[in-house]
Amino acid sequence: MLAEPRREVSVSIPLRRDDGSVEVLRGYRVQHNYSRGPGKGGVRFDARVDLDEVRALAMWMTWKCALLDVPYGGAKGGVRVDPRGYSTAELERITRRYTSEIAPLIGPNQDIPAPDVGTDEQTMAWMMDTYSVGRGHTVLGVVTGKPISVGGSQGRAGSTSRGVVAVAVEALRHVGIDPEGATAAVQGFGKVGRGAARFLAREGVRVLAVSDVNGAVHHPDGLDVEALEAHVDATGSVVGFPGGTPVESDEVLTADVDLIVPAAVEGVIHAGNAARVRARVVAEGANGPVTTAADEVLAANGVLVVPDILANAGGVVVSYFEWVQANQSYWWSEAEVDERLVERMIRAWNDVLAYATDNQLSLRLAATCMAVERVYRAHEVRGLYP
Ligand code: NAD
């Protein structure tokens, strides 16, 4: 039962382009599991989206929600489209038609979409509006990741990064390194990597190197992250930052630091470079940055890997907080959101560490086993209908 998605829908999305022509796109929504609560998962706009990818991502969400013990199942959606080739007005029409096609499946008690690759707060505002128009009243809890002005949560924008850093700091302590004065390198300077660098610096960790798709910068005493963010705002890239020297992008992963945070794309630490990783801790900001083969090499070399379903789950935790706030129409301060997020992340870290220690497993296997067990227990106690 856990291997099979519970529901899948594939929809046709006819789009009137700005030039008057009509084109037909394909969209999907998959609810992998909803035994522990409504489905939860992002909507991806990408040219590579297909049903299999959406299925895999929906299952990933089931485990992530179970591991963090938020009362959700797992779901995911997507439209097979490269958003860069479409105007804002066209993207709005795509979003609204997609939402109305999947509307019977979604809702605050059924399935709650959120942003993912290629979608953002604006997309969520359009989804919420379209769904609400259909119901005849405003339904804030139907999506998360909305703008603050229409029921978004304080602290959601940085929540994934905040969570990554909360568990990375615990992992450093676990291997006997004081985070204050420890060193780190971050791959990727987007929504996750940039915030990770900022929050690491706030914890007293010196960020020696960062990279983005264009290149990397390094400073032996630690980069001034605030100045680097200003440089990225002005130029669009970390390249050319005057407060560091340019280095090869891949050197970020093999830098002589205590912690690396791969926060860009999947498969970047692989059999070819894993043996050269010198950090004691790898915290997976991205989904799937360490391959299975690399996992074995890192384990043999005593490198502790904090797996993605734990490390980058801060976003789904604050999505849960957003949904709770929207359903109650009662809004928390940024400090309250932050405190509750960190508390949940550290609790999950402690649980996974204890399970891994008790069962002699890697953190990745322990996290996955715990998540699968929780979903299994829900099925067991609910029983099989009819
Ligand atoms: P993003 O598009 O905002 O940022 C990606 C960054 O990676 C950019 O700075 C880009 O230049 C850089 N990059 C791309 N290819 C690179 C390469 N080969 N080498 C170095 N840098 C490279 O995306 P994001 O939202 O930050 O997501 C990053 C990863 O985190 C993805 O795997 C995503 O699935 C995962 N993730 C994101 C969230 C979230 O809340 N945004 C939550 C969970 C997981």
Image (spheres, rainbow, N blue to C red):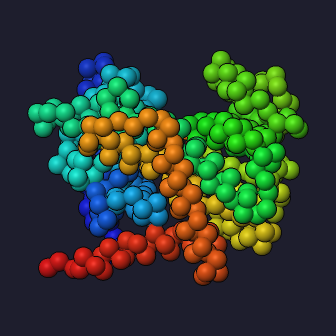
Residue beneath the point at 34% across and 25% down: 149
Q: Is residue 259 above or below residue 210?
A: below
Residue 270 rendering spot, x and y as whole percentages: 71, 60
Ligand 1 location (quadrant) = top right
Judging depth in this view, the residue of 365 and 24 nearest the camera is 365
Judging depth in this view, the residue of 204 and 220 nearest the camera is 204
Residue 121: which quarter of the image?
top left
Residue 284: which quarter of the image?
bottom right
Q: Could you tell whether 365 is left or right of 107 in the image?
A: right
Quadrant where the C terminus sits is bottom left
Quadrant where the N terminus sits is bottom left
What is the number of callouts on the image?
0
Residue 52 rendering spot, x and y as whole percentages: 40, 59
Q: Could you tell whether 243 is left or right of 360 in the image?
A: right
Residue beneath the point at 51% across and 70% down: 368
Q: Is residue 150 above or below residue 142?
A: above
